[in-house]
Image (cartoon, grey):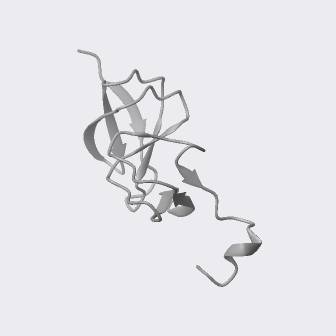
Amino acid sequence: MEDYKALIVKPEDNVATALEAIPANKDAVVSCQGRVSTITVLDSIEFGHKFATSFIAKGSDIRKYGEVIGRASQDIDIGAHLHTHNIEGTRGRGDQVGKE
């Protein structure tokens, strides 16, 4: 069985980045600052794309690089692909001023 590689940049991140293409239902070996875990991805993940490392409830912050990069527009299961279909951008939106 082949394991695929992914990286979490900061321990507080709730997404990992695929370091290679990962087929659906395959294990990704995820490393972060010397800690290693395994997550089964639910969807095919392209190189450089993100997947959830924990359950993310609708409306919750998405964290990558230790920073909020958006909010979940729906509930997101562990191992699910994160992209425009389930992340709502929060940067540069005039309707979000004072709501953070």
Q: Residue 64, position in %: x, y?
A: 51, 55
Q: Residue 80, position in %: x, y?
A: 40, 39
Q: Is residue 28 above or below residue 13?
A: above
Q: Quadrant of the C terminus?
A: bottom right
Q: Residue 98, position in %: x, y?
A: 66, 84
Q: Classify residue 68 by image quadrant.
A: bottom right
Residue at 34% x, 46% y: name it. 77
Residue at 55% x, 34% y: name it. 48
Q: Is residue 50 left or right of residue 100?
A: left
Q: Residue 99, position in %: x, y?
A: 61, 81
Choose between 75 and 79: the one closer to the eye: 75
Q: Is residue 24 left or right of residue 64?
A: left
Q: Is residue 49 left or right of residue 43?
A: right
Q: Is residue 49 above or below residue 10?
A: above
Choose between 29 and 23: the one closer to the eye: 23
Residue at 73% x, 68% y: name it. 93
Q: Quadrant of the N terminus?
A: top left
Q: Classify residue 91 by image quadrant.
A: bottom right
Choose between 26 and 96: the one closer to the eye: 96
Q: Is residue 52 above or below residue 18?
A: below
